[in-house]
Image (cartoon, helix red, strand yellow):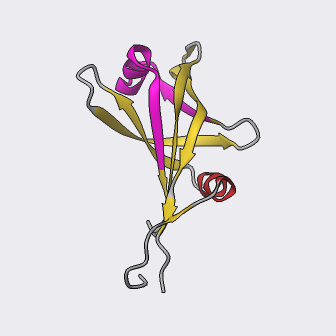
Amino acid sequence: MAKNAPPRALDDAALSDLIAEHTFGALATVKRDGRPHLSTVVYDWDPETRVIRISTTEDRLKVKHVRNNPTVSLYVSSADHWKFAVAEGKAELSEVTRTPDDGDRLYITLRIEKLYGTALDIA
């Protein structure tokens, strides 16, 4: 890393590209006591609508948290961890699909209200 190089804010296009380049992130939900709960998730990003969708099952703790408080954040890091993006917003839960093959699945849909992140430039 360049000596004393400050973090560089990423613009909206760079943040969207970073989220699009990856499919894994950490979803932060809010526990009843106000502390964050982090879950590794696989997501799908639609840059046109600024929506992130996460497939999960009804029995997951993150689903319970979203039902109690829809405020969530998704953290995505570059492969080398020198860049990151955070997408914040309110999550919505889809109806549960009950199938013998897939279990009780649903989607968490995150409509982005705020998107931010930085990069540390390496010499």
Using the rendered view, name the quadrant where residue 40 is placed: top left
Indicate left or right for 65 with 22 as reference: left
Q: Residue at x 48, y 87 (%)?
A: 123
Residue 4 location, x and y as percent?
37, 80
Indicate left or right for 50 with 78 as reference: right
Question: Does 73 lie within the magenta span?
Answer: yes
Residue at the extreme right of the image, as rendered: 48
Residue 87 location, x and y as percent?
53, 42
Q: Residue at x 55, y 14 (%)?
A: 96
Does 67 sit above or below residue 88?
A: above
Indicate left or right for 94 with 46 as reference: left
Does 98 sit above or below residue 101?
A: above
Question: Does 110 lie within the magenta span?
Answer: no
Does 61 sit above or below residue 18?
A: above
- What number of labels is visible? 0
Q: Residue at x 56, y 49 (%)?
A: 23
Residue 111 location, x and y as percent?
61, 30
* Quadrant for the N terminus in the image: bottom left
Residue 11 versus residue 79: which sits nearer the camera? 11
Q: Residue at x 34, y 39 (%)?
A: 38
**Residue 101 in sight:** no
Residue 91 location, x and y as percent?
53, 25
**Residue 66 in sight:** yes
Does 36 sit above or below residue 90?
A: below
Stretch in magenta? 52-75
